[in-house]
Amino acid sequence: MKKLIQLFVAIFLISGVILFTLNQLNETQGYSGKNVLNIYNWGDYIDPALIKQFEKESGIKVVYQTFDSNEAMLTKIEQGGTTYDIAVPSDYAIAKMIDEKLVLPIDHQKIPNLKNIDSRFLDLSFDPKNKYSIPYFWGTVGIVYNKDLIGKKPTSWKDLWDPKLKNQILLADGAREVIGMSLNSLGYSLNETDESKLQEAKANLMRLTPNVKAIVGDEIKLLLANEEAGLGVVWSGDANEIMSENDKLDYVIPKEGSNVWFDNIVIPKTAKNVKGAHQFINFMLRPDISAKNADYVGYSTPNKEGLKLLDKSVRTDKRFYPDKQVTDTLEVYENLGKKMLAHYNELFLEFKMHKK
């Protein structure tokens, strides 16, 4: 027993020495709290060269981690086990984080480059006056189509129900996107909560089943680029990437309207380097940095000064930078509350399980 106690004491002492040594090494190399910035972002959603540039200019070491859904990001931040200084949630997730007090207010005086953001993308419903978030990228939900495979350009959500499109449609695996598409096709809001209209939207989707080849995640990009289907409901940034792989493909926002989404930068409440977080946000809002990032990622930038630096063919592309007439027909997903969001998921699951 005595030897066992001695063994435990030895292990404890050795562990303490190792932890102390690592801590000293981290401080020496600039990895301590005030010299490190922990960023939590979507995968492949920033130009890696810009991280290196920020590190060089600021002297702050960036630790970069990724997530694949707003839900995964929310769970990690709610648990509080890892302290992130920067996160990049979508609009409805931001509203939820504000409601649950998971984010810190942002000091606009420390972000002078905020002046570069187009006013259209500020003071939106999910974060009035941008008290807690700063615009990063934005986009729409629409239709990628292959004219050679389907014969004509779709202009309406209703076109997806054409019997000629049997087994030709791929859908993004998202409840809000798919239920919303059906609601839009019926002339209803993407944020509908009326039960009779939601049931009508579900029944409408059931009638779409013969045309649906699959409901998929990220692989939708590869499948459409490889012409495994003639049409897909996707996010605009994915559409841009898909089209770069196959010039037979095009993208359209249906005339009834659709979703316009926003991914904004927030500072989680557990942040250890709030000063560094503000530095990073201001850095990303520089016109030259914004333009480089948009070139790399392929999504639409809300930075009006950065937009001017993009190639003319990019900044004048109405598919990804639609004019006000189009954006006025688009809706932002609202935070409908846990109960209603769970109901949307239930309706979507019923559709996914419906047999052809």
Image: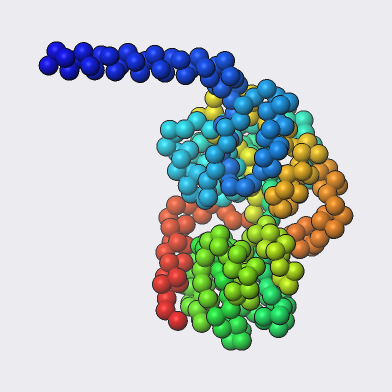
Q: Nearer the viewer, residue 153 or 59?
A: 59
Q: Is residue 248 above or below residue 325?
A: below
User: Taking 97 as reference, is 114 left or right?
Assistant: right
Q: Is residue 195 visible?
A: no
Residue 3 appears in which quarter of the rendering? top left
User: Taking 212 as reference, is 280 left or right?
Assistant: right
What is the image's colouring?
rainbow
Q: Is residue 98 above or below residue 355?
A: above
Q: Nearer the viewer, residue 28 or 178?
A: 28
- Residue 342 x/y as whole percent: 43, 58
Question: Where, quadrant-wise, is the C terminus in this rendering?
Answer: bottom left
Residue at 53% from the left image edge and 76% from the top image edge: 212
- Residue 20 x/y as whole percent: 43, 14
- Residue 39 x/y as whole percent: 58, 35
Question: Which residue is farthest left?
Answer: 1
Residue 141 appears in which quarter of the rendering? bottom right
User: Taking 45 as reference, is 5 left or right?
Assistant: left
Residue at 81% from the left image edge and 39% from the top image edge: 288
Q: Is residue 306 above or below residue 176?
A: above
Q: Is residue 263 visible?
A: yes
Question: Where, quadrant-wise, is the N terminus in this rendering?
Answer: top left
Residue 234 appears in which quarter of the rendering? bottom right
- Residue 59 x/y as whole percent: 68, 22
Residue at 60% from the left image edge and 75% from the top image edge: 229
User: Taking 234 as reference, is 72 left or right?
Assistant: left
